[in-house]
C-alpha cells in the first residue's frame, strides 16, 4: 500500500519502547521514524548481491513526491547498470575557492588595507 502524507504525519513515534518505525512506500522506499519523532527517507536495494541503504533526506523538508522521484532516479540508474554509490562529483569546490571568489567581487569597493584585512580573516 502506498504511503500518504497524512499517514506519515499521523504515525506516532514509539517513545515507550524506543523502537524505530519503518513505513514502506514500495520499491525499497520507506520513511524511518526515530523514537524522538524525526522522520527520514531511506531507500534500500540489493546491488550486486549486497543490500545497501541510502539516506535520501529528512521529512518534511523532502516531500513524499520528492522522495519517490529520488527513488525512481536511483532505480533508473540501476536499470542502466550505473551503481549510484559509485557516482563521484566532477569537482568539489573548496571553501577557500568560494571565499576567494567572493573576495574578488567585493574588494572593488574597498580600500587596499581593508581588502587585505578581510582576506587574512
Image (cartoon, rainbow, N blue to C red):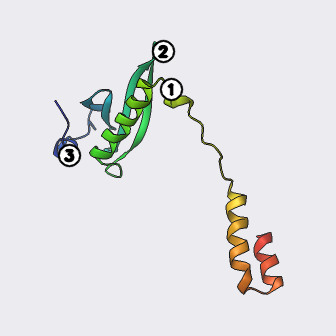
Residue lying at 46% horizontally and 12% vertically, measured from the top left: 49
- Residue 5 circle label: 3
Where does the N terminus fall, quadrant-wise? top left
Q: Residues within 10 Å of mark 3 (few under 14, many from 20)?
A: few
Q: Is residue 49 above or below residue 6?
A: above
Seen as rendered, the residue at the extreme top is: 49
Instruction: Assign a secondary structure to mark 3.
Output: helix
Q: Earlier in the sequence, mark 1 or mark 3?
A: 3
Q: CA distance from mark 2 to mark 1?
A: 9 Å
Q: Earlier in the sequence, mark 2 or mark 1?
A: 2
Instruction: Assign a secondary structure to mark 1.
Output: loop
Q: Earlier in the sequence, mark 3 or mark 2?
A: 3
Where does the C terminus fall, quadrant-wise? bottom right
Residue at the disc numbered 1: 83
Q: CA distance from mark 1 to mark 3?
A: 29 Å
Q: CA distance from mark 3 to mark 2?
A: 33 Å
Percent from the top left, x then y, of residue 19? 31, 30
The reply to whether callout 2 and callout 1 are in contact (CB within 8 Å) is yes
Amino acid at each position: 500500500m502506498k504511503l500518504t502524507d497524512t499517514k506519515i504525519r499521523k504515525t506516532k513515534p514509539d517513545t515507550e519502547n524506543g523502537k524505530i518505525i519503518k513505513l514502506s512506500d514500495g520499491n525499497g522506499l520507506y520513511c524511518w521514524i526515530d523514537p524522538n519523532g524525526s522522520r527520514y527517507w531511506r531507500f534500500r536495494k540489493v546491488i550486486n548481491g549486497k543490500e545497501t541503504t541510502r539516506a535520501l533526506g529528512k521529512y518534511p523538508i523532502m516531500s513524499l513526491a520528492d522522495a519517490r522521484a529520488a527513488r525512481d532516479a536511483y532505480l533508473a540508474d540501476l536499470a542502466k547498470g550505473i551503481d549510484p554509490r559509485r557516482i563521484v562529483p566532477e569537482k568539489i569546490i573548496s571553501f577557500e575557492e568560494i571565499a576567494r571568489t567572493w573576495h574578488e567581487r567585493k574588494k572593488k569597493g574597498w580600500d587596499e588595507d581593508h581588502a587585505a584585512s578581510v582576506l587574512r580573516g
